[in-house]
Structure formats: structure tokens, C-alpha cells
Amino acid sequence: MQPIRKIASKTVVMPSANIDTDQIIPARFLTITTKDGLGRELFADWRYLSDGLPNPDFILNKPEAAGCRILVAGRNVGCGSSREHAPWALLDYGFRAVVSTEIADIFRSNSLKNGLLPVVVDAATHQWLIEHPGAQIDIDLERMRLTLPTGVSAAFPMEAFARHCLLNGLDELGYLRSRLQDIEHYEAAHSV
């Protein structure tokens, strides 16, 4: 996992509420056991026409979406079934953060464990982002602030452990491995 400190990028805006995990990565792709290549299937049912060609009206198929690392979504993004493939697909496509006023709990947890930053902002900041697609914004995980190009910034919550892991590029197992010496010391001191 790559450490996250700051993300500076233009945004891709998908203002729909309740974008669920089956829309993010349809169930037919859940048999894939590797993360590589899932970005091609991201939003597959919206992104591609029935003949398999790219839907020219879908935002990810437009030139302005190229290289954007921040997805701004409507309320309750990531709802639906639990599937780790959803953050895998977003990351493989190139997104590093998802911004909304509400992010479903399981999707949020899966995102944090895989290095995708879920950012929950206030309604006014979110509305500004929705109204200004393609805006260049800065997300600072160290300060836990999102800054708009206007200079206005908004705080976002992040639990301490998740923040530590993201800042250091660690998943839960990596964190435990980083504490191996402390664990061994504790076990030695408390062995029977």
C-alpha cells in the first residue's frame, strides 16, 4: 500500500445518491481474485454500452476524467453488499480518494484497509464540489483537511488508527508486523 499524506487532483463528479457496490463493480466480476485489471470493470454497467463499446455520455469516458484521482460522489456512496472488490476497482482505475457527505460503513472500512481514502465533508463543501466538476482540490491527511481552489478548507474526520495506517502505507497485518518486537517482548514478559 502506498502511504497517503496529501492528494492534489482534479475531481470527477458523480452526483447520484446511493451509488452501491454493485454499480461500482458488478457482481459478475467478483470471481476475480487479483486486484490487477479491476479498474477496467469499474462502473461497467454505466461505463459501457450493451455492445461493449464505451458509453460516450459516462463521465469516466470523457477526456476531462483522465488522470483524476479524486471521486466526488452523492450521498451514501458504497451502500449495498460488502465487497472488497469495490475499493480495489477504484484504486486500480487510479482513484486515491472518495469524497461525499455520507459513505457506507462497510465500504468505508474496506477502503481504509486497502489504501483508498474515504473523506466525509459537510453539506456546503460537498455542494460546492458537485457544482464545480473538475475542480483542483487538495486533501491533506496529516491535517485532516480538504481545501477548495477558493482557499476555503473543511475538516474531515478520521479515526487515529486508520489515519496512522494510511499515512504509513500499512494495512492491519503490516501494522502488526511493525510492532513485532513489542509483541515478542510482551509475550516473553508474560509467559508462564
Image: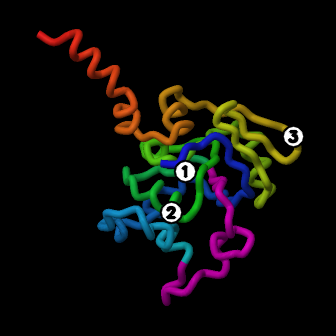
The residue under the point 33% across, 67% down is 32
Query: For residue 60: magenta?
Result: yes
N-terminal of the pair, mark 2 or mark 1, is 1
The residue under the point 64% across, 76% down is 61
The residue under the point 38% across, 37% down is 172
Q: Which-is-in-front pick, marks 2 and 1?
A: 2
- Using residue 57 as the reference point, say whether residue 94 is left or right of it: left
Q: What percent of the width, then of the height, locates residue 22? A: 43, 62
Q: Nearer the viewer, residue 116 or 26?
A: 116
Q: Amino acid at mark 3?
A: Gly
Q: How is the image coloured?
A: rainbow
The answer to whether residue 105 is visible is: no
- Which residue position is annotated with label 1? 77
Secondary structure that dominates the magenta span: loop
Q: Which-is-in-front pick, marks 3 and 2?
A: 2
Circle on res. 151:
3
Q: Amino acid at mark 2?
A: Asp
The answer to whether residue 115 is visible is: yes
Circle on res. 92:
2
Quadrant in which the C terminus is drawn:
top left
Q: What percent of the width, then of the height, locates residue 30? A: 34, 64
Mark 3 and mark 1: span between their CA atoms? 26 Å
When asked about the image quadrant of residue 174, the answer is top left
The magenta stretch is 48-74
